[in-house]
């Protein structure tokens, strides 16, 4: 009998002797370089995106909390610091289970798990186990215990695409490792045994059982005392995702469109390696600006929806299941297919009457809505409402909590975009490409070719100034009509937005009031060919998309919000072409610079000047009138005198714009439907896009001093056409000789 074990031992020794030279090199392990995903950051360090198959954040062993180390040892290998890589007693037990055909095997130490994860398959055979043991011995000879534990903590798979405990802490709890409690340490430490089985997002009850086992082991090993055990057992888990989520998962800053743009730029340069080599992309946006832009656009689109009536429930569920099941879990199952859209939470209606509405929210919360908050959904609560859309028990609706309490809301069908940038160098400060990236990934800020409407008029008026006209030049605001012979296609009878005609007026008043008839007459005077050449060569617009017809005066061509931002920057920075950019630099995993943008600042190279500074000054003067006494008068609520811009509304209210600036910041807001259609009567740029711009600028310009363009040389003051409008200016070389003696230099800009 004694001979059989000896014979087996001898056989194992011989096999080991043959296998040892065949073991792989530990070079990759000794020089451990984990697969780190691509990460995108704001200019001030906020994470806005992560791309890669393996979600991982490297953490050095010196930075790993002791509580996590204790939890891992309690769950996986309490004799880790005592054995030489293999726990003989546990291994013998696992080997016997294998030989008798058991479905499970145990006894793997942390070192053996590292060996298996790096070099071996997970098949359960004696030969594979032998290689695992030998590799473990070799690892222990080559690496210190702390090095082995560091590799394990960073490499192990823990479910939800999270590799390593630092990534898992963010994935499951939305926290850094250092912020976790003993209860959370124990939950994570229980995952390596079977990540899918003990995943708290998928099966909270099973995960809790495993967590309690780890906590008991921590108590038995003396890592925690009885008080800490009781406290950890009683602590409610605050998951960051899944049906039991009670807090937002990181990243909280909504810049998904920016992150996707940065990802594409990084991929173009580094191809597939970009997803695993730990590259960091630093964008130009700031956290404050991005949050202001996101919230401003979102608020503007939701307000639009409220003005146009409630469309009703977005789905229905069968509440009869509740009577059969009688459990809260059933409600959770029913609401699962309806994800929350940021603050717009999915809700199942439980009760609905003219007095109150009771609804269930994901996570178990019930809310009650009553009083004025019911006015919005009331038409769809009536008995004669279409059954599929009726707000009644079983209806799935959206609710959001505002200052006045819970309100019924609905995801807008309309879309929008907002982009802001520093006109001095082109750095994008914020970009929101649509209402919700997860619902519609089309980036309207960069890809939506839309008619700019009246927001295009400043470029035409700038061309007129270049031709010798002044802000005080008088044009007739009277009806126009063009025959089919004149247009070359069909008869055209343009009109003013409000249908009113006011006769002779100055250019500055025509721009402030957005008079279409004057804009057309201006383009007639300078010719459509000159106008097209001017706006394309100076401001960078596509000539193919902006053909030389009189309709160009009304913005009938096609532009993107990104293009409009670059074009308005020329007015804001004194007349220089800038090139908008959104990525500042790219760094490797060690922080070394791989690529960096060195933008050219406006004024540093006169060859980049595209507008005469006098033209800029006069164009700015006219666009300030738009804010002070024109269609953008709402912007005066910001209490600043340095704001300028132009509203834009296209024919039949299809597109709404506001493009505005001051010398350090340009902002472009656009609203419209993906499939162009009427936004509704009265939904002008001033009513729809301007409030979005104001919301953003109120936060972005807070505590920033007013700035004004310096008065350039070469302008002379002439008698205004209308005294009430203030002084008028003309280029010195355009001044009629008879008027020269009366001319004087313009006053300096206000401080």
Image: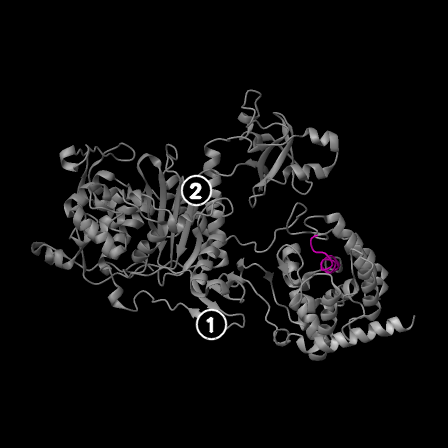
Secondary structure of the residue carrying tag 2 is strand
Q: Check the image and report above or below for 338 versus 233.
A: above
| Label 1 – label 2 distance at C-alpha | 37 Å
From the image, give the main secondary structure of the stretch colored magenta: loop
In-front residue for pair 119/548: 119
Q: Who comes first in sequence, dot 1 or dot 2?
A: 2
Image location (x, y in percent) of residue 413:
46, 37
Q: Read off the residue under disc 1.
A: 593
Q: Report the residue at 30% width, 36% height from top.
A: 651
Q: Check the image and report above or below for 200 versus 271.
A: above
Name the disc covering residue 415, or none. Answer: 2
Q: Which residues are magenta?
A: 186-196
Mark 1 neighbour class, 10 Å CA radius: few under 14, some 14 to 19, many 20 or more:
few
Mark 2 neighbour class, 10 Å CA radius: few under 14, some 14 to 19, many 20 or more:
many
Q: Report the residue at 74% width, 63% height from top.
A: 125
Q: Report the residue at 72% width, 56% height from top.
A: 194
Image location (x, y in percent) of residue 277:
53, 67
Q: Do residues under tags 1 and 2 come within 8 Å of each other at their CB atoms?
A: no
Q: Check the image and report above or below for 296 versus 396.
A: below
């Amino acid at each position: 009998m004694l001979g059989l074990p000896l014979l087996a031992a001898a056989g194992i020794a011989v096999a080991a002797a043959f296998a040892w030279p065949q073991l792989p090199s530990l070079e990759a392990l000794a020089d451990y370089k984990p697969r780190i995903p691509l990460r995108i950051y704001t200019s001030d360090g906020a994470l806005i995106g992560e791309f890669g198959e393996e979600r991982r954040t490297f953490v050095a062993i010196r930075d790993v909390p002791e509580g996590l180390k204790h939890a891992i040892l309690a769950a996986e290998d309490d004799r880790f610091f005592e054995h030489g890589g293999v726990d003989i007693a546990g291994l013998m037990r696992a080997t016997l289970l294998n030989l008798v055909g058991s479905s499970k095997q145990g006894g793997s130490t942390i070192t053996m798990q590292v060996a298996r994860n790096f070099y071996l398959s997970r098949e359960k055979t004696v030969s594979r186990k032998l290689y695992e043991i030998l590799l473990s011995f070799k690892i222990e000879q080559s690496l210190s215990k702390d090095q082995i534990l560091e590799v394990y903590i960073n490499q192990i798979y823990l479910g939800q695409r999270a590799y390593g405990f630092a990534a898992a802490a963010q994935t499951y709890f939305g926290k850094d490792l250092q912020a976790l409690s003993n209860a959370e340490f124990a939950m994570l430490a229980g995952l390596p045994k079977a990540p899918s089985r003990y995943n708290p997002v998928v099966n909270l009850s099973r995960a809790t059982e495993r967590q309690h086992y780890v906590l008991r082991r921590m108590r038995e090993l003396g890592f925690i005392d009885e008080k800490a055990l009781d406290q950890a057992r009683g602590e409610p888990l605050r998951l960051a995702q899944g049906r039991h989520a009670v807090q937002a998962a990181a990243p909280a800053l909504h810049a998904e469109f920016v992150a996707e743009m940065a990802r594409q730029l990084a991929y173009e340069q580094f191809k597939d390696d970009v997803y695993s080599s730990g590259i960091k992309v630093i964008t130009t946006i700031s956290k404050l600006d991005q949050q202001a832009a996101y919230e401003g656009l979102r608020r503007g689109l939701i307000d639009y929806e409220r003005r146009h009536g409630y469309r009703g429930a977005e789905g229905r569920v069968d509440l009869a299941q509740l009577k059969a099941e009688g459990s809260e879990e059933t409600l959770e199952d029913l609401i699962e297919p309806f994800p929350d859209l940021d603050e717009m939470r999915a809700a199942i209606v439980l009760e609905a009457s003219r007095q109150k509405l009771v609804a269930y929210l994901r996570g178990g919360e019930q809310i009650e809505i009553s009083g004025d908050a019911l006015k919005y959904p009331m038409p769809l609560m009536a008995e004669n409402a279409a059954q599929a859309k009726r707000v009644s028990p079983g209806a799935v609706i959206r609710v959001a909590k505002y200052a006045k309490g819970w309100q019924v809301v609905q995801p807008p069908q309309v879309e929008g975009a907002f982009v802001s940038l520093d006109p001095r160098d082109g750095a994008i400060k914020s970009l929101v490409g649509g209402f919700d990236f997860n619902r519609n990934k089309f980036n309207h800020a960069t890809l939506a070719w839309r008619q700019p409407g009246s927001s295009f008029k400043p470029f035409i008026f700038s061309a007129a100034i270049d031709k010798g006209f002044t802000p005080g030049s008088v044009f007739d605001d009277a009806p126009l009509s063009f025959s089919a012979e004149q247009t070359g296609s069909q008869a055209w009878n343009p009109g003013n937005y409000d249908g009113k005609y006011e006769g002779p007026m100055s250019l500055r008043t025509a721009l402030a009031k957005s008079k279409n008839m004057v804009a057309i007459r201006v383009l007639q005077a300078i010719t459509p060919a000159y106008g097209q050449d001017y706006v394309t060569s100076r401001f960078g617009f596509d000539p193919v998309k902006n053909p030389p017809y009189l309709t160009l005066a009304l913005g009938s061509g096609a532009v993107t919000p990104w293009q409009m931002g670059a074009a308005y920057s020329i007015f804001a920075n004194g007349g220089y072409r800038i090139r908008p950019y959104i990525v500042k630099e790219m760094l490797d995993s060690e922080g070394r610079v791989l690529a960096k943008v060195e933008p050219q600042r406006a004024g540093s190279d006169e060859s980049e000047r595209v507008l005469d500074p006098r033209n800029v000054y006069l164009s700015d003067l006219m666009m300030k009138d738009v804010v002070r006494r024109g269609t953008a008068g709402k912007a005066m609520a910001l209490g600043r005198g340095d704001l300028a811009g132009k509203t834009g509304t296209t024919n039949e209210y299809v597109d709404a714009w506001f493009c505005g600036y001051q010398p350090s910041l340009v902002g472009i807001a656009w609203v419209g439907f993906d499939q162009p259609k009427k936004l509704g009567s009265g939904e002008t740029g001033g009513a729809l896009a301007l409030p979005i711009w104001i919301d953003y600028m109120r936060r972005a310009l807070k505590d920033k001093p007013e700035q004004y363009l310096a008065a350039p040389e070469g302008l002379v003051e002439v008698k205004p056409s209308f005294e009430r409008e203030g002084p008028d200016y003309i280029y010195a070389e355009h001044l009629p000789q008879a008027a020269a003696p009366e001319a004087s230099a313009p006053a300096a800009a206000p401080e």
